[in-house]
Amino acid sequence: MMAIVGSAVGLGNIWRFPYLAGMNGGAAFLLLYLGLILLVGLPMILSEFILGRATHRGAVGSFKQLAPRSRWYLVGYMGVAAGFCILGFYSVIAGWSVRFLYDAVVNAHAGLSQEEITAGFNAFKNSGWQPILLSTGFLGLTALVVFKGVEKGVERWNKILMPLLIGILLVLCVNSLTLEGFREGMTFLFRPDFSKITANTVLDALGQVFFTLSLGMGVMITYSSYVVKSENMLRSKGIVVLIDTSIAIIAGIAIFPAVFTFQINPTEGPDLIFLTLPNIFARMAGGQYVGILFFLLITIAALTSIVSIFEMMTNYLMEELKMTRRRAVWWLFGTLSVLSALCAQSQVEGSGLRIGNLNVFDLLDLLSANYLMTVGGLLIVLFVGWHISEKRLRRVFTSNGRYNNRLFPVFRFVVRYLSPVAVAVIFLSKIGLIRG
Ligand code: TRP
């Protein structure tokens, strides 16, 4: 279970959740996010688990086994595409966290005003080569880890680091109490303003549910295929979802009071936590050390997530294209370095690397979470709800009748109707076919 928590908890909770909540009106976003976690996230994570447990095979393999001679396995390939997009921008953010770690070590932000912190960060992004160097370095490190195959070691690390990360976030929450902007921050995060909700907000909330739970890519299918012992699936996945959601909310409580105290614009976007955190650390007793530890931890959290996506893709290349491990790792490292460099370069002011009003970075972020993962997820619930026989589904869901027999009909109804309809409605309203 810790492995699954480790995959789920990452930059998605600490970086992505606060930035999206900030852009989408805070509490209204939080509420939608919580509703969609229950309506779509939990049934979805259970569905992926059922596929893995029923077949003991990975994302592509489980479809090939359950639906031979059909095209369902293409869903697995969509996951690979999503993973590719995610790694492109995730490694850039991981690179940023390395730079902030360095700044914390040399205490670079001590005594700086908000304008100076913002200017310093912009100069870093605008240099182009600095973020590119860092993200490429990060990918290199990932490639090395995956090549050496120390997955087991990474999981063990997760067990120690995860509680430590939660501990530090809690310290930051307590620290939030002392900030002038505490009330305003809490109001923003917890008092919904429904006029802020648009089709985009709902799609962003849905995308975040998929992103934060690592859904729609078959990652959970792969993990669950390793689980041998029978367990109460609903309970263990419920706990995973609960932990993941709590961490996102805790991160929100740590960030938003500071956003208002230091008058940072909550709609800042992907930069949000990086503009906010240095202030918090600069004003805290012993803040430099808390800062070092914090950035060290999120760097490692990012590394473990990147390693697991990278590993999954290496696996595909080896199994489906019969590459050697060395070759697959080199190939991925090369292509991903180009992609992440494009992402980083697209954030340089005045860069032409954009499509419409989105730069390549934002485009990959939204494309993977809001479209690839959600469509992949939709297909997975449809498959589980409509393609697998009721008898078989019941057997896997209840571990041969041991647990949750009475909840099974509810689960089946949710995966057959509620979840797919929810996802479909969100899409259609986004494209403008339904007006809300
Ligand atoms: N859930 C991770 C996070 O919140 C990100 C993620 C998405 C991920 N898909 C994944 C991690 C697949 C590992 C594997 O940061």
Image: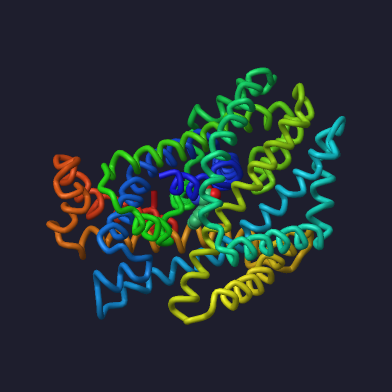
| Residue under the image location 77 percent in, 49 percent down | 99
Say above or below: 25 vs 396: above
Horizontally, residue 328 falls left or right of residue 429, namely: right
| Residue under the image location 37 percent in, 74 percent down | 74
| Residue 386, image x, y percentages | 20, 62
The one nearer the camera, 133 or 272, is 133
The one nearer the camera, 257 or 236, is 236
| Residue 181, image x, y percentages | 67, 23
Occupied quadrant, residue 307:
bottom right
The one nearer the camera, 264 or 139, is 139
Does the image show residue 200? no
Say above or below: 94 vs 251: below
| Residue 217, image x, y percentages | 43, 61
Does the image show residue 21? yes
Say above or below: 291 vs 338: above
| Residue under the image location 61 percent in, 56 percent down | 90
| Residue under the image location 14 percent in, 46 percent down | 401
